Image (cartoon, grey):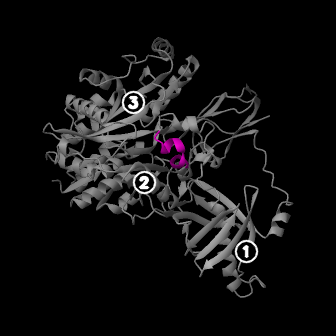
Amino acid sequence: MFKKILVANRGEIACRVINSARSMGISTVAVYSDADRDALHVQMADEAVHIGGAPAGESYLLSDRIIAACRETGAEAVHPGYGFLSENADFCRQLATENIVFIGPPAEAITAMGDKMTSKQIAEQAGVNTIPGYDGIIKDVGHAVQVAADIGYPVMLKATAGGGGKGMRIANNEEECRQGFERAASEARSSFGDDRMLIEKFIDRPRHIEIQIMADSHGNVVYLGERECSLQRRHQKVIEEAPSPFIDESTRQAMGEQAVLLAKAVNYCSAGTVEFIVDQKRNFYFLEMNTRLQVEHPVTEMVTDLDLVEMMLRVAAGETLPISQQDVRLTGWAMESRIYAEDPIRDFLPSIGRLVRYQSPDNESGKVRVDTGVFEGGEISMYYDPMIAKLVTWGPDRNQAIVAMQEALDEYIIGGVQHNIGFLGALMAHPKFKAGQLHTGFIEEEFPDGFREADVIEDTPMLPIVVAAIIHRLYMDRAARISGQLAGYERRVLDDWVVVTNEEQYRVLVKPFQADCGYRVDCNGEHYGVLTDWTFCQDIMRATINGKRLAFQVSRHGIGYRIKHRGKNTRAQVFTPRAAELYQLMPKQVLEDQSKYLLAPMPGLLVQLKVEEGQQVKAGQELAVIEAMKMENVLKAHVDGTVARISCRSGDSLNVEQVILEFE
């Protein structure tokens, strides 16, 4: 076994690899860029080596710097994690010439599976089901339109070297094909340095289901069940689970056996994932093979009780697999939510900045796992993927895994940057998600106008109102005990208040009934028994309401309160009945009209300006392209108008809400 390995990555995956290596008694070396000097993975490793500037192209993507760090520290092997150099065959070969072990598959397997056209041909020869499409590289836009017409719309435009949703577009007609080809090719060129494109038939409402495989260098290959990865936004996975609620045992076996055939066809070794799309009749088709550890591997670990990183280390050291196919057992159900620094309300735009508050849920139940590379006081950088953490929960069945996830999301505290926890909570509460009615277009179909807090489906919508009333009662009691505060206020047997939220008013009666911890709250004709020992120093109120244990994130917000629960962010104010009457007479603040400006919705690089001063534009016309966190974002006109003034130029770095141009 290795004595020392280098982890050629950053963030949560670097921390994840370091944890497994440490449990095996292996020393670890971290590498870091200027932006990651104080990062968590640097703090966790036994040694750390600086390898360059903040942009990945000046650090994590420089194979020579990684190899030099191995020489400097005496690392015998390199674990690449995912992303960066994890699927770079040339890097794998460079390591071999230096007698450094690559903890992953052979370079030949990476090359074969890294090109979508080649991998599809190999899959067909190995007897794996494949999607109908054009067997070759698309030359240009005209060729793309011709091929798409021959295949029949809708089609999928894909970069041959793509991954992670980059360099991919769906086209439903010729116009979308032309625009999508240009955008996907540009994105692929920027992300992978390779803009070769292919086209294949797009299967409507498919599921994205993948098989985890593990192979050693002695010819042994096993599959470790499937993962359901159908909940995606812009081809980026949002929630994954294992097993799939759709796959039966016979389909699981057929998919697993085909994945093994493909692995053997390329003499695969290490962890890998064979991805399939599955139609409504459980017909499955090969999509691609990821020759690395997947982001969502923890759900497989939770249901198999296997450590995939440890297995990768062992097979890289020449050991045989410790299990056979007959030993693989799937126990219970696991869910994974990807927590990102992004703003769902603003079309999921990336958010950067310092984590002024960060507290992950506890694991008292043994059902919660948090893989992260951040800490309170750390920074979310504009240079890398905006992932904050992967939150994973386990339950004996799917419903209990969902409930565990909802509870964990309720307890996850993040401050300083925007995040998608509210959106994840909304997905978990969605009836179709609970029923397992999933497909890759689920989010676009169920949230066609983007995500809004009003979209959250609440089982008991009055709960935030009840909590606001309890907090206010405790606040008033505390204030009454402070000398000189609330003169004349006395703790009463019954409080009669009005809770105001979203301009709606709710008459609430609060009555203590059990020492200082119990209350009866009457609201909208319903009765709520509440037990809580919450105090003002706590960010989370844990309470038993009508016999059910629940958690709420609570904070003071001006003269009111902010309550977060099940993906809903409620802002509430509590008044006496007379004060509520007067509140209705208060003038409402009118926000400044900014409709005549095109504002940068995120920090990033202005890649292209597509209009000029004095030009007339139509609603829906493309105005500018901004690149942020590895993705290109197209800004379009909302209404017809004329460009009066342009304030920025292509190549400028933009701040959030910076004026790009102004309309007449």
Instruction: Tell me, for residue 400, which label it has, or none.
Output: 2
> Mark 3 highlights which residue?
277
Q: Secondary structure at mark 2?
A: helix
Measuring from the top left, give residue 499's x and y in whole percent.
Answer: 73, 64
Instruction: Determine if the magenta segment contains residue 390.
Output: no
Q: Is residue 587 visible?
A: yes
When asked about the image quadrant of residue 516, the answer is: bottom right
Q: CA distance from mark 1 to mark 3?
A: 58 Å
Measuring from the top left, give residue 325's x and y in whole percent.
Answer: 19, 41
Asked if the residue under mark 2 is in contact with the one under mark 3, i.e. CB atoms within 8 Å, the reply is no
Asked if the residue under mark 3 is in contact with the one under mark 1, i.e. CB atoms within 8 Å, the reply is no
Q: Is residue 606 visible?
A: no
What's under tag 3, amino acid-wise?
Answer: Ile
Measuring from the top left, give residue 100's x and y in whole percent.
Answer: 20, 46
Q: CA distance from mark 2 to mark 1?
A: 37 Å
What's under tag 2, amino acid-wise?
Answer: Gln
Q: Is residue 650 left or right of residue 241?
A: right
Q: Which residues are magenta?
A: 426-436
Instruction: Tell me, for residue 495, which label it has, or none.
Output: 1
What's under tag 1, amino acid-wise?
Answer: Asp
Instruction: Tell me, for residue 218, which label it has, or none.
Output: none
- At x 36% / y 59%, what residue is drawn? 42
Q: Residues within 10 Å of mark 1 (few under 14, many from 20)?
A: some
Mark nearer the N terminus (3 vs 2): 3
The C terminus, quarter of image? top right
Q: Is residue 456 left or right of residue 488?
A: left
- At x 48% / y 47%, what residue is drawn? 383
361 w.r.t. 206: above or below: below
